[in-house]
Amino acid sequence: MILGINAAGWAFPPFIIFAGQYHLSAWYEEEDIPRNWAIAVSDNSWTTNELGVEWLKHFIKHTDGKVIGARRLLILDGHESHWSLEFQELCKENNIYTLCMPPYLSHLLQPLDVGCFSPLKRAYSREIEAPIRHHINHITKLEFLVASKAAFERSFTSANICSA
């Protein structure tokens, strides 16, 4: 799951990458899943250069008009998908300045890991606790989406984002 947050304390909708080759209609028919969440697939659920560009378009769509001034700063962890020519050109076209954190230090330099992503992990664990207690160890992608929505709403609050 790729998430984004701005300094004003709001999170834009998640961009979720599942392992697979095809989208399933059930992912989009579930009433609890917000329509503005993006769902993508890759063979191994990893971000590719193409998915990095799709995420950037998602970022632009959900941050356009919410910025003060003409420029946006995008802080990145240095994944190779952030350095594709298409990614960089799209940033330039949209007045997005990128700042890449040094390798192997992003865990120290990302306060959102503590303020938002740790609460997200704990909230998700609470969401899937009941099935695990009943020895259900496989969570389907649809169940993941429903549990993720509840966890996202509990953890990505303005208070958590601003404190991070």
Image: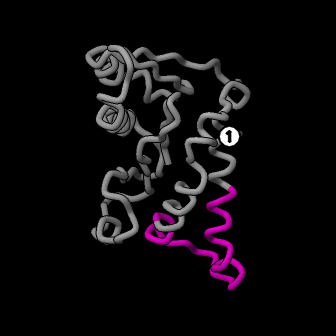
Q: Which residues are magenta?
A: 122-145
Residue sitting at x 41%, y 52%: 43
Residue 5's place in the image compared with 151, above or below, is above
State the predominant SS element of the stretch in magenta.
helix
Residue 99's place in the image compared with 157, above or below, is above
Res. 48 image quadrant: top left
Q: Position of residue 52 (x, y in %)?
A: 39, 34
Q: Can you see residue 40?
A: no
Q: Can you see residue 144?
A: yes
Is disc 1 surrounded by few (<14), some (14 to 19) or many (20+) residues within 10 Å?
some
Res. 22 image quadrant: bottom left
Frontmost residue, 74 versus 66: 66
Give the amino acid at mark 1.
Gly
Residue 164 shown in magenta: no
Residue 135 shown in magenta: yes
Q: Position of residue 11 (x, y in %)?
A: 47, 41
Q: Is residue 51 left or right of residue 126?
A: left
Q: Is residue 123 left or right of residue 147?
A: right
Residue sitting at x 29%, y 70%: 29
Q: Position of residue 67 (x, y in %)?
A: 37, 24
Frontmost residue, 161 versus 44: 161
Which residue carries the number 1 mark?
Answer: 115
Q: Position of residue 53 (x, y in %)?
A: 33, 32
Q: How many marks?
A: 1
Residue sitting at x 60%, y 51%: 155
Residue sitting at x 48%, y 43%: 2
Q: Is residue 79 left or right of residue 25?
A: right
Q: Which quadrant holds the C terminus?
A: top right
Frontmost residue, 14 versus 6: 6
Q: Is residue 93 left or right of residue 136?
A: left
Res. 101 image quadrant: top right
